[in-house]
Image (cartoon, rainbow, N blue to C red):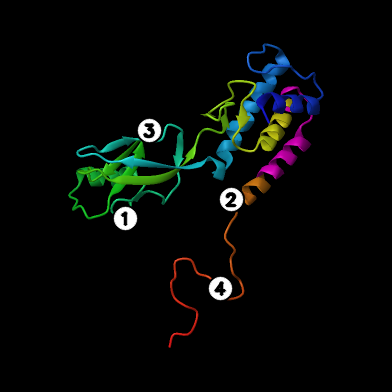
Amino acid sequence: MSLLTICQNAAQEIRVAKPSTIVGNTDETAVMLLRAASRAGKVLARRHDWQVLQKEATITTADATASYALASDYDHHVNDTLWDRTNYWKMNGPTSPQDWQTLQSGIVTSGVRRWFRVKAGLMYIYPTPSSADTLAYEYVSNGWCQDAGGTAQTDWAADTDTGVISEYLIEAGTIWRGLKAMGMAYAEEKQEHDAEVDLAVMRDAGAPTVQMHGEAKFDYGVNVPEGGFG
């Protein structure tokens, strides 16, 4: 579903004239719908760490280099995902500013594990690397929409843009925001939107089943048979 389709569907629900174009259109209705669709997408992207926005990136360290650029579409870190794949170690962090200054300024004896901190768009590694090692981490992308060629974007730029996150939810968010902007009643539409978002969050990427009636038949990470020990 394109931005144009989202806005035209919303216009039909709001019962205003459907614009033939959105981006670059100076008509008041088109401007209002674009603003509503933009707000709907941005707020929705911040509502949850949607699995469709979760990505993996790698860093190759270099001798005497302490800081490294993050992925170009980096929004925020997925905790407990940074690993030193060369040495098979989990990295310590993200480190708080206080602990980081202790590492930088205090009397610290370095162990085999590395620490990291994310600030100012960079990832800092302690101790400063002295070799070329591969670090891998997961993060949430800020590209909640994309152009017709699939390039991620942080906002709508053309009528042919599509949503990376749920376009159904973006449309629902556009409808109630459009009604509000027009000075119409919107409480029912907002309630429906919020309920659909909550349902989508609950279903997103699934979840493990909690066993309430005894042990599970398979325990991930445990390589011990259930019986027949000898």
- Sequence order check: which comes first, mark 1 or mark 4? 1
Amino acid found under the numbered disc labelled 2: Ala
Query: Which mark is drawn over residue 88?
Result: 1
Tag 3 residue:
121
* Labels 2 and 4: the sequence-earlier one: 2
Is disc 1 surrounded by few (<14), some (14 to 19) or many (20+) residues within 10 Å?
Answer: few
Q: Secondary structure at mark 3?
A: loop
Q: CA distance from mark 2 to mark 1?
A: 27 Å
Q: Nearer the viewer, mark 3 or mark 2?
A: 2
- Percent of width and height locating residue 125: 28, 43
Hey, what amino acid is under mark 3?
Answer: Gly
Q: Quadrant of the C terminus?
A: bottom left
Q: Looking at the magenta stretch, what is its main secondary structure?
A: helix
Measured in 3D between alpha carbons, the distance from the residue under mark 3 to the one under mark 4, in whole angstroms, is 44 Å
Earlier in the chain: of badge 3 and badge 4, it is 3
Instruction: Pick the residue in front: 20 or 202.
Output: 20
Q: Report the residue marked by disc 4.
A: 217
Residue 189 to residue 81: above or below: above
Q: Secondary structure at mark 2?
A: loop
Question: Residue 165 versus residue 182: which sits nearer the camera?
Answer: 165
Asked if labels 4 and 1 touch by Cβ distance under 8 angstroms, the answer is: no
Label ID, residue 205: 2
